[in-house]
Image (cartoon, helix red, strand yellow):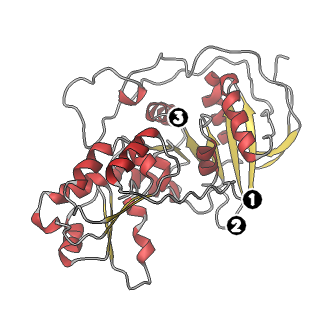
Amino acid sequence: MSPWAGCREEMAVHTPVTSAAVFGGVGMGPQEHALRAGVDVIVATPGRLLDHFRHPYAALKGLEILVLDEADRMLAMGFLPDIKRVLRHLPAKRQTLFFSATLPAPIVALSREMLRDPATINLDRRAAPPVGITQAAYPVDAKLKPALLLALLRRGDMKSALVFTRTKHRANRLADWLERQGVRAARIHGNRSQSQRTLALEGFKAGRHDVLVATDIAARGIDVVALGHVVNFDVPAASEDYIHRVGRTGRAELTGEAFTFVAPEDEQDLRAIERALGKPLPRVLLPDFDYRQKAPEAPPARHEAHPRHAPQGRRRPGGPSRGRSEPQGAWAGRLQGEAPRPAGHLRGAGRTTRSFRPRGR
């Protein structure tokens, strides 16, 4: 089982192994046909597999090996209840493999519940972004991050970008705001159905969208060849997520650029990333950008229910991912400190750019 069954099917191409991808957002007919005919490997998301388990043709009595791919991500996406329901349909005698980049406490507890005397293989290889990626940090107040992103896009050097936010709620707000500024933007996150994610990704690949706003969880299945720019609108809390994000560009020996917007409150997370990278990221200020301008007004938040668990009435109170709205007109917190001083020069936004002092200093 994997959170991204749709992108795994090609692994069996040009081999004698037969496979089927079972995931939501598409018709069940072809999947039912594959399950009835019998295949060697089924790559499935938990929710759609449960849909098939309602019918007798989906009995997996001959299952020998169960693999939970990206177990930590499935846990973060809330798949744990579905996983436990899937296990009740599977033979008790089987080999079970856990693949997980991290081992949080719930994953350890689940492994003890599912596995018997497991052997642990820890590939603690130090990950690093591809060599062809130019990385830079853009110090900016949190409130001005949308305006800075818009300025980079309007310069013309960054024609398209994959932009990462911390939460689904912030992804919705940023995509809505960009659309209001005339930018062709799409979003991809855990509250979008499989068909919505597929449509957004295909539109981005085809050039119908200039910006694809994504969360870390949803971005695990993103594979775009010749992607020129990745923007960390929010600094990731873990260095592994940073490496995964910027690794979306510079693929297949191509070059790319990865920009990280750093508010004063993000500095600690950025320093942890720099320690993991073994080097500091150059700080860059965008010439002619007014770092003292008024923060842009944010559009009303668009709340989206999970496609499998959409409530019929009012939303219950909760965090941003459950629909709690943030203060309008402010993207994050209060203004903290002054605009940073320029630091050196860097190839920024597609060409060599020397940093200048922001206006007003």
Residue 126 lies left or right of residue 22; in this view the side is: right
Image position of 143 with respect to 287: above or below: above
> Which amino acid does the dot numbered 1 rest on?
Gly
Residue nearest the viewer, comparing 144 with 240: 240
CA–CA distance between discs 1 and 2? 7 Å
Residue projecting furthest to the front: 117
Q: Are marks 3 and 2 in contact (CB under 8 Å)?
A: no
| Spot occupied by residue 309 in the image (x, y as percentages of width and height) | 24, 39
Residue tagged by mark 2? Answer: 253
Q: Earlier in the sequence, mark 1 or mark 2?
A: 1
**Residue 301 visible in the snapshot:** yes
> Which amino acid does the dot numbered 2 rest on?
Glu
Residue tagged by mark 1? Answer: 132
**At 56% across and 48% down in the image, what residue appears?**
210
Q: Earlier in the sequence, mark 3 or mark 1?
A: 1
Q: Say which element carries label 2.
A: loop
Q: Are marks 1 and 2 in contact (CB under 8 Å)?
A: yes
Q: Residues within 10 Å of mark 3 (few under 14, many from 20)?
A: some
Image quarter in which the N terminus is found? bottom left
CA–CA distance between discs 3 and 2? 28 Å
| Spot occupied by residue 192 in the image (x, y as percentages of width and height) | 36, 44
**At 82% across and 16% down in the image, what residue appears?**
360
> Which amino acid does the dot numbered 3 rest on?
Arg
Q: Residues within 10 Å of mark 2 (few under 14, many from 20)?
A: few
Image quarter in which the C terminus is found? top right
**At 36% across and 40% down in the image, what residue appears?**
191
Residue tagged by mark 3? Answer: 166
| Spot occupied by residue 235 in the image (x, y as percentages of width and height) | 62, 35
Q: Earlier in the sequence, mark 3 or mark 2?
A: 3
